[in-house]
Image (cartoon, grey):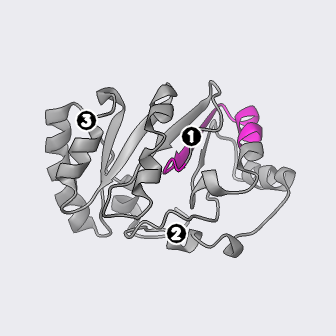
Amino acid sequence: MRLQGCGVGCSWCDSKYTWDPDKGREAPLPAILDELFTHGPTDLLVITGGEPLEVRGFEELLEAACRSWTRVEVETSGVSSPPASVGNLFWNWSPKLPRVTPRWDDTWGAAAAWMAEPRTIAKIVVGEGDEAEAIRLARTLPRDRVWLMPEAMTEGDLKARSVELAEVCKREGWRLSPRLHLWLWGVRRGV
């Protein structure tokens, strides 16, 4: 489920169409849930954006989702502290690096609160020239909860960056998130 609206403004964002909250479709919560259920049975709901923490009504949606799905994952830059802690709620916190957005420090400001949530991972997107800064910041986090993801928009760039970051992950004891959807479908919406 992709929510509309984001004020973080990452320079390399692959979903800038989500930034303007007025370009989304507003609906009452029961209608949103009904539409999600039409896609068939599943145990997992992933909520992404935009930036979910900046969307009006997000906490109400989150509560309903946690009642309706076995597992709920939220992808967020973490511009504020986690608004909820429920046993089936998992956070994919993606703090930003300095060259990515002027708001990068907002995404790191609640790092202690994010890491206090036992079901939170830190997924750091690493672009060309960002490796040293990513390593410096990632080393401040629990090793077993750090994932690096290559910034890339083409299959060639993705492969090259993944190989480089795989070596960093092996050395540091971190995990690699290789953007499988880009390898499978390219830069496409709705997949």
Which residue type carries mark 3?
Answer: Arg
Which numbered marker is on residue 186?
A: none
Q: Nearer the viewer, residue 84 or 90?
A: 84
Is 116 in the magenta? Answer: no
Camera-near label (2 vs 1) is 1
Q: Is residue 172 left or right of residue 191?
A: left
Q: Is residue 35 left or right of residue 155?
A: right
Q: Position of residue 101 (x, y in %)?
A: 40, 64
Which residue type carries mark 1?
Answer: Ser
Taking 40 as reference, is 98 above or below it? Answer: below
Secondary structure under tag 2 reads: loop
Residue 102 shows up from this direction = yes
Q: Label 1 near label 2: C-beta < 8 Å?
A: no
Which numbered marker is on residue 139?
A: 3
Secondary structure under tag 1 reads: loop
Question: In the rendered image, which residue does mark 2 sit on?
Answer: 189
Q: Is residue 106 left or right of residue 3?
A: left
**Inter-mark Cα distance, 3 to 2:** 33 Å
Question: In the rendered image, which residue does mark 1 sit on?
Answer: 81
Mark 1 Cα-neighbour bin, 10 Å: few <14, some 14–19, many ≥20:
some
Find the magenta span and give its range.
62-79
Q: Nearer the viewer, residue 42 or 178?
A: 178
Taking 78 as reference, is 174 above or below it? Answer: above
Which residue type carries mark 2?
Answer: Arg
**Inter-mark Cα distance, 3 to 1:** 20 Å
Q: Earlier in the sequence, mark 2 or mark 1?
A: 1
Q: Quadrant of the N terminus?
A: bottom right
